[in-house]
Image (cartoon, rainbow, N blue to C red):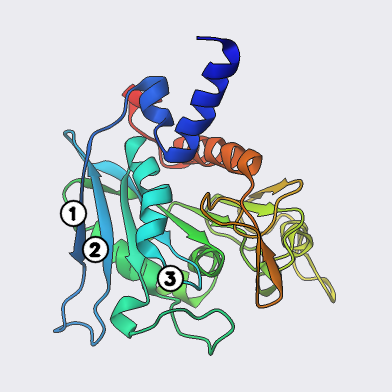
């Protein structure tokens, strides 16, 4: 096999979530839809797609939150499956189905702020999850939710369970001061015209449109990665270039490959994966 063919095979593996299998052996997992609340406790009980790597002991876990177009099953197939192959329990939340929603892009705001904590409440009760090592990962609207759960404030302070790390793919950073309570990773495209990289840079540096909003040393440091040439939705391989509500969406292969590596490294450093697949 030539070096070129090997390189193409590796990139293909990364995009399909099989890189762990190519590089260090895939962690076998079970997968199923679960309802993690009941009608007795919630009028709109949430559900999600749960992936559990086989193996003894309690494992670290990741809660995944979808964007304004829903597609929680696609998110699981794109990221949940991949992260589970690295040795993490994953729970991809369906925030819309129980509420009877199709999407919220450009529509009236819906209170989804506590969905991440509701998912966390389910995970910490499972014997196969290490409750001290759970991260939250969101995309676009879901990234806003993820950052909301870990920024210093009432939701984070009042929750009996805590996330240990947070990751946001192309979040709207304008609403945040950046006083995060856990290690946080933000990934955004330089050309994103929906959730602007400039606003995330301002948040990380402690600035907003009206001046300095906090001291730079307040909160736990945020790692920001900006991908040149990338737009909103850069990690969605089946997304052709298109316009949505006046914003450009487009898959970017280079940014996707780099984000996979960045996410895996961040998870290993913050909540830790299985030793045998590192």
Tag 1, which secondary structure? loop
Q: Which residue is mark 2?
A: 122
Vertical order, 191 against 16 (above or below): below
Work out whether residue 119 or residue 169 is closer to the camera in this orientation and state it: 169
Q: Which mark is residue 261?
A: none
**Looking at the rendering, in which quadrant would you find the C terminus?**
top left
Query: How far separated are the C-alphas under marks 1 and 3?
Result: 26 Å
Tag 3, which secondary structure? loop
Would you say the residues marked 2 and 1 are in contact, meaning their CB atoms lie under 8 Å apart?
Answer: yes
Total labels: the figure holds 3
Q: What residue lies at 45% left-to-right and 74% top-to-bottom?
A: 155
Would you say the residues marked 1 and 3 are in contact, meaning their CB atoms lie under 8 Å apart?
Answer: no
Task: Let me know if residue 63 appears in the view.
Answer: no
Q: What residue lies at 63% left-to-right and 63% top-to-bottom?
A: 179
Q: Which mark is residue 126?
A: 1
Of badges 2 and 3, the one in the foreground is: 3
Give percent across and percent down for residue 56: 16, 34
Query: How far separated are the C-alphas under marks 2 and 1?
Result: 7 Å
Q: What residue lies at 44% left-to-right and 52% top-to-bottom?
A: 164
Residue count near mark 1 (Cα–Cα under 10 Å), binned few <14, some 14–19, many ≥20? few
Q: Which mark is residue 70?
A: 3
Q: What residue lies at 28% left-to-right and 64% top-to-bottom?
A: 48
Q: Is residue 151 left or right of residue 175?
A: left
Would you say the residues marked 2 and 3 are in contact, meaning their CB atoms lie under 8 Å apart?
Answer: no
Work out whether residue 107 or residue 153 is closer to the camera in this orientation and state it: 107
């Amino acid at each position: 096999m030539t070096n070129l063919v090997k390189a193409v095979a590796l990139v293909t593996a990364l995009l399909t979530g099989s890189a762990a299998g190519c590089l260090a052996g895939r962690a076998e997992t079970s997968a199923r839809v679960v309802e993690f609340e009941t009608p007795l406790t919630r009028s709109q009980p949430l559900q999600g797609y749960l992936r559990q790597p086989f193996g003894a002991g309690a494992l670290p876990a990741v809660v995944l939150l979808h964007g304004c177009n829903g597609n929680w099953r696609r998110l699981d197939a794109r990221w949940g499956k991949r992260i589970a192959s690295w040795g993490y329990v994953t729970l991809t939340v369906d925030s819309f189905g129980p509420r009877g929603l199709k999407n919220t892009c450009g529509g009236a705001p819906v209170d989804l702020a506590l969905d991440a904590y509701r998912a966390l409440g389910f995970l910490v009760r499972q014997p196969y999850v290490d409750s001290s090592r759970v991260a939250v990962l969101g995309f676009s609207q879901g990234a806003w939710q993820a950052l909301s759960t870990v920024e210093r404030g009432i939701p984070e302070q009042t929750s009996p369970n805590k996330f240990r790390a947070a990751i946001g793919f192309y979040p709207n950073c304008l609403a945040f001061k950046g006083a995060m309570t856990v290690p946080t990773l933000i990934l955004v495209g330089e050309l994103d015209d929906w959730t602007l990289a400039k606003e995330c840079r301002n948040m990380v540096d402690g600035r907003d449109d009206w001046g300095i909003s906090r001291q730079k040393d307040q909160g736990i440091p945020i790692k920001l990665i900006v991908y040149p040439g990338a737009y909103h939705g850069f990690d969605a391989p089946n997304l052709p270039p298109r316009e949505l509500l006046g914003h450009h969406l487009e898959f970017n292969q280079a940014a996707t490959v780099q984000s996979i590596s960045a996410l895996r490294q961040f998870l290993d450093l913050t909540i830790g994966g299985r030793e045998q697949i590192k």
